[in-house]
Structures are given as structure tokens and as C-alpha cells.
Image (cartoon, grey):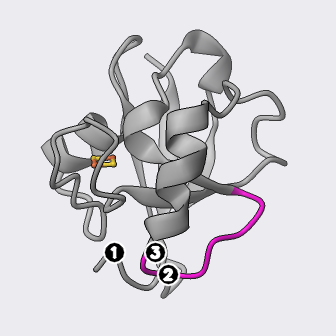
Amino acid sequence: MPNITFIDTENISQSIDVLVGETLMRAAVNNNIDGILGECGGACCCATCHVYVDATSVPDVPRIGEMERQMLDHVAAPRRDDSRLACQLVVDPSMEGLRVRIPQTQL
Ligand code: FES
């Protein structure tokens, strides 16, 4: 199970082991990671699972899809080049050690 670290805006980090095949959003919600809401349940239509992916931790996260790209226009916190929706990131073994930052707000 890849170990993934969520870092909040206070720089407090929480690391969890995530099942391969599970989305980052589902793993965060199931592990009570504050700041990841996932209100649409992973249907890519709420933008409340916004994260900033630290590309230095894992260089090759799965590529962004068109639906996700469009939904990122609706995130509450500033959209950045490293913005992703956690519900669209399906965890695979190559994501061991991934670090993601949680934005200031999701609403
Ligand atoms: S959970 Fe709604 S867009 Fe990710």
C-alpha cells in the first residue's frame, strides 16, 4: 500500500497507507483528513477535493483528464499548475511517497 502524505496550510502533515485502486479523495475522507470534502462522491462535479501535488515527491502522477481540467476552473482556492482533484487520482504503486498539499479552502 503506497504511503501518501497530506500537508495542511499550517504545514502539519498526516501520512496514510492507501490501497492500490482507491482514489486519493476516498482515502482522505475515510481517514478523516481535514480539508478534503469530496461532496460529489468522486463524480468530478464539485471541485471540493482540490489538492496541490508536490511533483518533487513523485514525478509521474497520472495525467490530467479533460473533465478534471475543466472542473479545476471551479476550485475555491487559487488554481495552480500543480492543482489536481483528488477524486481523479487513482492510487497505484508508483505513487509511494506522494505528498499533496491541502488548499486553504474548498468552498
Ligand atoms: S469529489 Fe467532487 S470533484 Fe472530486
- 10 Å crowding of disc 3: few (<14), some (14-19), many (20+): some
Q: Is residue 28 above or below residue 79?
A: above
Badge 3 marks a residue whose secondary structure is loop
Q: Is residue 99 above or below residue 76?
A: above
Residue 31 position, x and y percent, is 19, 46
Number of numbered discs: 3
How far is mark 2 from mark 3, CA to CA? 13 Å
Residue ID at (84%, 48%): 56
Q: What span is in magenta?
A: 76-82
In this figure, which residue is indicated by the disc labeled 2? 77
First of labels 2, 3 by sequence position = 3
Mark 2 and 3 residues: CB-CB less than 8 Å, in contact? no
Residue 66 position, x and y percent, is 60, 34
Mark 1: amino acid: Gln
Left or right relative to 43: residue 5:
right
The residue mark sitting in front, 2 or 3, is 2
Residue ID at (45%, 60%): 50
Residue ID at (64%, 36%): 97
Mark 2 and 1 residues: CB-CB less than 8 Å, in contact? yes
Residue ID at (26%, 35%): 43
In this figure, which residue is indicated by the disc labeled 3? 8
In this figure, which residue is indicated by the disc labeled 1? 106
Corner quadrant of residue 17:
top left
Q: Which mark is residue 10?
A: none
Asked if ligand 1 lies within 8 A of label 1, the reply is: no
Q: Which quarter shows the N terminus?
A: top left
Which secondary structure type mostly characterizes the magenta part of the structure?
loop
